[in-house]
Amino acid sequence: MQLDTFRDVIDSTRAEIGKAVHGQDDLITLLLVSVFARGHCLLEGPPGTAKTLLAKTLSRTMQMDFGRIQFTPDLMPGDVIGGNIYNFQSGSFHLVKGPVFTDILLADEINRAPPKTQSALLQGMNERMVTIDSDTYPLGENFFVIATQNPIEQQGTYPLPEAQLDRFLFKLIVDFPDKAAELEILKRHRSKPIGFEPEKNDIQTVLNAETLAAGRALVDTIRLDDTILSYILDLVLATRNDAEIRHGVSTRAADALAGAVRARAAIEGRDYAIPDDVQALMVPAFRHRIVLGPTAEIEGRTPEEVLLSLFNRIDAPR
């Protein structure tokens, strides 16, 4: 696949998603970066901000299997990955696969389930395989998780373990659209039946397995200069040495950001990465991977504020 063809695919995908999700253009771009960088994505925001709609609409633009798990406090790990069930007629066990066996998995309200159930996704997200009763089963190279969660200070939720957060390439904050965008949403829906589902609004398939593989192969060819890698590492090391941060980001995070930078460069129509790519992706790639220190917490600082302060102290390559 050539860069021009890739850009056409991206533009078509954006247009199809835009039929159902209005006023979230930057969010859609970051979600597509995540798809082509082979990373999972966590969407956080208050109820009613189109988190689930965005995930379902993306799945409709991709000709691949889609599965959804509604996380609840009583959900068990076996409800996620499946298990071996004894058949009394045959006198043997047979595997019943859980909803994790799909290409695109929507983990809806993932922080509604306790950590034991959340951790059922760890192996699948990291290795794209799951282990059931000592046997390992592949999930496929296209396995991709989009998880949604409401802000964790709401009642009845559980914070995601740091080990699981580190498996997400991006944590994207879904906020309310501005007034003009929200008015446009209401205008779009006033001619539709009440209860109309926007993700069914004539969404066309743009990506199939072959197109996705070709796009990812193109992303693999994007050039990353040593100066870009050094810039990424400077930012990573700064998170580990900042007084406001108790735990900085991992080497996995540095490598994940480097991959995402290549995907963004391709989406922007370049066969090489520039510092702007790093700057655009650092906060969504790092915000969920740092643990703030007591000073920052006492002052009410957010991870975004701390990261931006740190970012402003690091010189970008010229």
Image: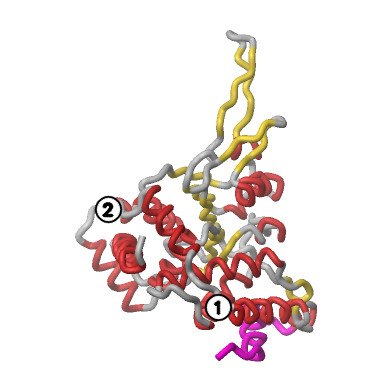
Give the side of residue 244 with respect to residue 98, left or right: right
The tag on residue 204 is 2
Q: Residue furthest left?
A: 191
Earlier in the chain: of badge 1 and badge 2, it is 2
Relative to 143, is 162 above or below? below
What is the span of residues highlighted in magenta in the rendered image? Answer: 299-318
Mark 1 → mark 2, Cα distance in angstroms: 32 Å
Between 116 and 192, the one nearer to me in the picture:
116
Residue 63, image x, y percentages: 36, 46
The tag on residue 239 is none
**Residue assigned mark 1:** 278
Q: Marks 1 and 2: CB-CB under 8 Å?
A: no
> In percent of the image, x 47 and y 48: which residue is there?
104
Q: Is residue 94 magenta?
A: no
- Say which element carries label 2: loop
- Say which element carries label 1: helix
Q: Amino acid at mark 1?
A: Val
Q: Is residue 200 visible?
A: yes
Residue 201, image x, y percentages: 26, 54
Q: Amino acid at mark 2?
A: Gln
| Quarter of image, res 245 | bottom right
| Colour mapping used in the image | secondary structure
Estimate how packed mark 1 is, as few (under 14), some (14 to 19) or many (20 or more) residues with alpha carbons within 10 Å: many
Residue 252, image x, y percentages: 67, 63
> In percent of the image, x 66 and y 91: which residue is there?
313
Residue 311, image x, y percentages: 63, 85
Relative to 231, is 117 above or below? above
Q: Is residue 300 magenta?
A: yes
Q: Is residue 62 visible?
A: no
| Quarter of image, res 86 | top right
